[in-house]
Amino acid sequence: MNPSHPARLAVLVSGRGSNLQAILDACQCHQLYATVVGVFSNRLHTPALERVAAPLRWAPQPTWRHDRRFFDQALAQAVAAVRPDWIVCAGFMHLLSPAFLDQFPNQVINIHPSLLPLYRGLRTHERAIAAGDHQHGASVHYVVPALDAGPVLSQVRVPIHPDDTPDTLAARVLVREHPLLIATLRFLVADRFHRTPDGVLLDRQPLLTPLQLTPANQWQQSDE
Ligand code: GRF
């Protein structure tokens, strides 16, 4: 990465794109020294794509989107073409292949709506309520081939209220996802995180537990 230029971000999306919008806004108001150089979807039509100008959008062709290997190759080629420093999965509902990840080593992160390692996969809010948990949240992690299993960089926690439904809880988590993602990206683009075979370094020191974002949007290291 060249620190004299804004970091180049490729964003992978599948749905509404509120996390993408948070990134676009943070870049626009210089809260994040980065620029979105491409937005890539695994779906033909998705509201997230509409958030950027047409030249930045990439969607699969209808004829080959069901061919997984072909899709992964085409996606990797298109992402490589924009020369990203970081690839951000922001509501991207597609498991990236080992071949894709090998091409972008330690460059791919994901935001997931749970306190990983709890509730990998789907329906996290429903599962947290059903388990009787008192808190839920979101995590930003490096992407590895196994679903939602990469080293966790950062988390934010929210309370679960007794009358919560999956939708009310999802809404409470989502508004905290946006500052979590931006605060984490600020560290990434400043090259403060490094992934090693043993885990993650923050400022060259082992990150023993994920950074925790407080309600005031400050970092605090968890002692749990
Ligand atoms: C977010 O909850 C994100 O954590 C999850 O999918 C949702 C995407 O929301 N991976 P949006 O498309 O960014 O609004």
Image (cartoon, rainbow, N blue to C red):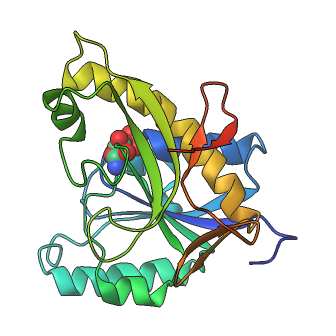
Residue that sits furthest to the right in the current view: 4
Determine if residue 169 is in view.
yes
Q: Measured along the vertical axis of the image, is residue 5 above or below residue 29?
A: below
Between residues 135 and 8, which one lies in front from this camera angle?
135
Quarter assignment of residue 216: top right
- From the viewer's perspective, is 50 left or right of 133? right
Q: Where does ligand 1 appear, by image quarter? A: top left
Expressed as whole percent of the image width and height from the top left, the position of residue 192 reads 73, 65
Q: Residue at x 70, y 53 (%)?
A: 186
Q: Measured along the vertical axis of the image, is residue 71 above or below residue 12?
A: below
- Image quarter where the N terminus lies is bottom right
Between residues 170 and 84, which one lies in front from this camera angle?
170
Determine if residue 23 is in view.
no
Q: Residue at x 30, y 24 (%)?
A: 169
Expressed as whole percent of the image width and height from the top left, the position of residue 5 reads 82, 69
Q: Residue at x 18, y 73 (%)?
A: 65
